[in-house]
Image: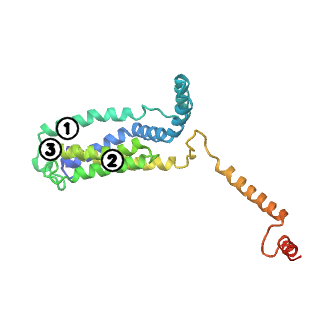
Amino acid sequence: MYHLTGQMGLPNYGLAIILMTIAIKLVMFPLTQKQMKSMRGMQAIQPKIKYIQEKYKDDQATMQKKVMELYKEHGVSPFGGCLPLLIQMPIFIAFYQSLFSFKFAVAEHASFLWIPNIGKPDPYFILAILAAVTTYLQQKISMVDSKDPTQKSMLYFMPLFMAWIAYKMPAGLPLYWVVFNILGILQQLYVNRSDHKAVPDTGTGIEVNRKEEVPMKKESLAEKAAGRDKGGRKDNGSPGTSSNKKRKKR
């Protein structure tokens, strides 16, 4: 990738890491797409899972069977998001080890923007802040239930953890993470947009049909109005009101 940047007329190791990150993201796109859909699907059916667990709490075998049927029905898996994360681990280790011992062909090309050397930690902590912000944004837009305590705790814990790593590690590693996060945010927005027409869940495993609710409410209001007309209780000079006043005078 460094030689490619040289052919582009911009020889730089930081730019080479960005190009490599884009290449890795393109290769992993099908897996990360499946991961994002699976994670969002798992979050969306959490109310149904809790409902099943409460309903069959005394029958573990039936509960497990119902939960597995729910996974199959919605096409999700609790392990769907593990594979892309496992694949990324060797990439992280490779970046970490190579940046510590990598011999730059041209030392001047190891500087990138405000970073004097991508083989050393960012002296201004800007990458640490960007790592925290992009991690927070990616988790925020991937959340379905913002009231879930587990998701809320991870929403704040992971950005702080990544900021600490970015502060300690060579700048090339958080640079890779920030670019990967930005691409992931764009991909997550695409997944959310394609998933926004999902039917809301009541939290009891029963989906609400909104089209049937409105006519029922209108019909009940019409019946109430008809009942008031028959009873003669309308105001504004209606016959029922005037007859009551005449009886009182007599």
User: Residue 65's mark?
Assistant: none
Of 61 and 2, nearer the camera is 61
Looking at the picture, which amino acid does disc 2 mark? Tyr
Label 3 element class? loop
- Which residue is situated farthest in the front direction here? 250
In percent of width and height, residue 168 lies at: 17, 44
Which residue is label 2 attached to?
Answer: 156
User: Which of the two discs, 3 and 1, labels the residue nearer the N terminus?
Assistant: 1
Q: How far apart are marks 2 and 3 (CA)?
A: 28 Å
Label 3 sits on residue: 119
Residue at (31, 43) in percent of width and height: 158
The secondary element bearing badge 1 is classed as: helix
Among the 4 quarters of the image, the one containing residue 226: bottom right
Q: Residue at x 17, y 56 (%)?
A: 114
Q: In which quarter of the image is the C terminus?
A: bottom right
Q: Residue 160 location in percent, x, y? A: 27, 46
Q: What element carries label 2?
A: helix
Query: Where is the N terminus found, in terms of image quarters?
Result: top left
